[in-house]
Amino acid sequence: MSDTAIAPKIIKKFLYVNRKAPYGTIYALEALEAVLIGAAFDQDVSLAFLDDGVFQLTKGQNARAIGMKTVSPAFGALGDFGVTRLYVEAESLAERGLTRDDLMIITHDFENGTTGEVPSIIVVDRARMSNVMAEHDIVLTF
Amino acid sequence: MQPTVPAARIEDVDVKISVLVHAAPYTHQAADTAYQFILAAIAKGHAITRVFFYHDGVNIATRLAVPPADDRNIQKCWSVLAAEHGVDLVVCIAAAQRRGILDEGEARRHGKGDGAANLAPGFRIAGLGQLIEMGIQSDRLVVFGA
């Protein structure tokens, strides 16, 4: 399979925009698969969560009773794949009665190798989210 | 912040465009809109780097769909597009397997029996790496979602 990058030296900024709840549709699950491949291709990968997508990061998910895979643990492992920025829209949280405390704690290691952990979740307002999108070369919506 | 790759203006001639289709055929107009967008882009002189089908968009690629005679046949539209313009139509292997879209090799590998393959002409099945690669190689990536 020709799954190796032909132009490996080009690194683009990919933003994966998640707009759907973690269950009810397959978008969250299949978006995560695409995120991991983007990271495997050594691209500069970030995620954004808005609208019902903010529910993807809420604490205490367990989808066993509905016969689905619980998707949320995968977000905690993203730092190991070099994915260290998860932008969350403040207005989308507020509109759903959520606060930052309702979200999982997701961290990654310092890039310079020193010990300690850095929060991956960055809560931004709607205007800043617009700028985040403009700063990326590729915006994939899910 | 300066983008790492200079963005091409869409009115420039010969912009390299890649297209990501998430939407199921018939249920969502996006499957038609993506096709019409590509025809318009080609007519304007732009190049289509690749089309990648993901989520329920992979269902566009089944040769077994039989829409009513007075309706458009979405799969055939895309197959003709590939034949006439050489557009690379790639169906995500993981999404396709989940939804029962198989080429001959995959049908054999999963023991589905002779004649089970249903991938329509002009489409090929490959991994998600093809999605990332087309993003790297094109000036614009346009998503047609559901």
Image (tube, grey):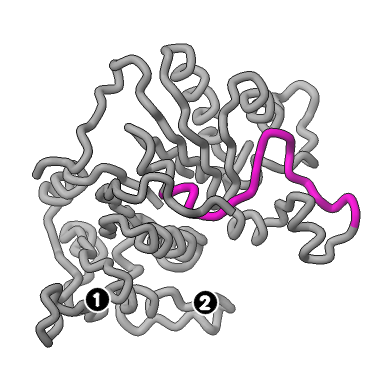
Q: Same chain for the residues at labels 2 and 1, yes or no?
A: yes
The magenta-colored residue range is B114-132
Provide residue B93's location: percent of width, then percent of height: 61, 55
Q: Quadrant of the N terminus of chain A?
A: bottom right
Q: Residue at point 76% right, 33% down?
A: B67
Provide residue B7's location: percent of width, then percent of height: 23, 31
User: In the picture provided, is B100 more to the left or to the right than A22?
Assistant: right
Q: Chain of mark 1?
A: A
Say if A17 sits above or below B136 in the image: below
Front residue of B54/B73: it is B54
Q: Secondary structure at mark 1?
A: loop
What's under tag 2, amino acid-wise? Lys
Q: As drawn, which residue projects farthest toward the right?
A: B114
What's under tag 1, amino acid-wise? Leu
User: In the picture provided, is B26 more to the left or to the right than A132?
Assistant: right
Query: Circle 2 sits on which residue?
Result: A69
Q: Residue at point 51% right, 41% down?
A: B21
Query: Circle 1 sits on which residue?
Result: A103
Say if B75 sits above or below A111 in the image: above
Q: Chain of mark 2?
A: A
Give residue B14's quadrant in the image.
Answer: top left
